[in-house]
Image (spheres, grey):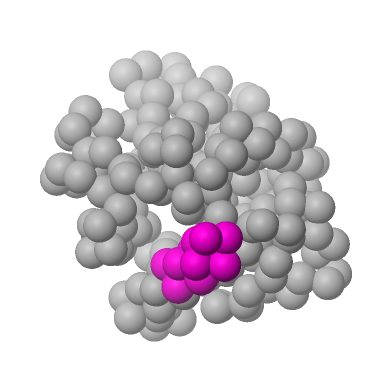
Amino acid sequence: MAFREELRAEHPDWWNAPVPAFGDPAAWLAIVGLAPGKHGANRTGRPFTGDFAGELLYATLAKFGLSEGEFAAERGDGLRLKGAVILNAVKCLPPQNKPEPAEIAHCRPFLEASLAALPKVRVIIALGQIAHVAAARALGLKPSATKFGHGAEYRAGAVTLLSSYHCSRYNQNTRRLDAAMFEGVFEAAIAVSSSQLLFHQ
């Protein structure tokens, strides 16, 4: 809290507050990130907007037809998501971009409520291990039985949880994650969603 108060004094024109979900209320796909980035969502008020990680995420959403309009890395760019919504495991900027376990636990009810308000979600993509564990808990899955890994897939009733390495600058610069790997997770999400629709027809 003290860290965020300092930022509010230093940057009074920034968002500097809990960041709401962004996307389609009728989304079939929910993307769960870690937390707002200092110069990204904490500044702009929109998830993955204004930082390096958002470039790959929003480019991927556009490639798969999950957005409309041009992404200009600002909240007022007019971009809309179609069939997708972006949430965070932690709603406020954590010091050093590393949320403490207590903060993650404190924010879990907000994530659970956000997912519960999205009745059409069939697939969740969790970005990184912290988001993966938070999403698994929100779905009632035991983290010990849902090990994180890039491309890992688990079912919780009618919802499938897919996981990806986070699209952070570090992961991209170290080649732990590249565009093809990231897009592969979205391809899997679309395949899972399509198979679920066929099953229920």
In-image side of 50 versus 170 (left or right): left
> In the rendered image, is residue 145 in sight?
yes
Q: Is residue 193 magenta?
A: yes
Q: In this view, which residue lies farthest toward the front?
A: 201
Q: Quadrant of residue 128?
A: bottom right
Q: Is residue 136 magenta?
A: no
Q: Which residues are magenta?
A: 189-201
Q: Position of residue 90 (x, y in %)?
A: 61, 41
Q: Nearer the viewer, residue 102 or 96?
A: 102
Q: Residue at x 80, y 59 (%)?
A: 141
Q: Where residue 158 sits: x, y (%)? A: 67, 57
Task: Using the image, determine if residue 11 lies above or below residue 184.
Answer: above
Magenta stretch: dominant secondary structure: helix
In this picture, residue 69 sits left or right of residue 86 = left
Give residue 61's quadrant in the image: bottom left
Percent x, y of residue 2: 63, 25
Q: Is residue 76 above or below residue 157?
A: above
Where 66 sits versus 50, above or below?
below
**Observer-nearest of 19 and 138:** 138
Q: How many numbered dots are placed on residues in this image?
A: 0
The answer to whether 145 is drawn above or below residue 12 in the figure is: below
State the residue at coordinates (62%, 77%): 152
* Residue drawn 69% across the image and 70% down it: 154
- Identify which residue is drawn at 20% across, 45% down: 68
Can residue 43 be seen here? no
Q: Position of residue 140 (x, y in %)?
A: 81, 52
Quadrant in which the N terminus is drawn: top right
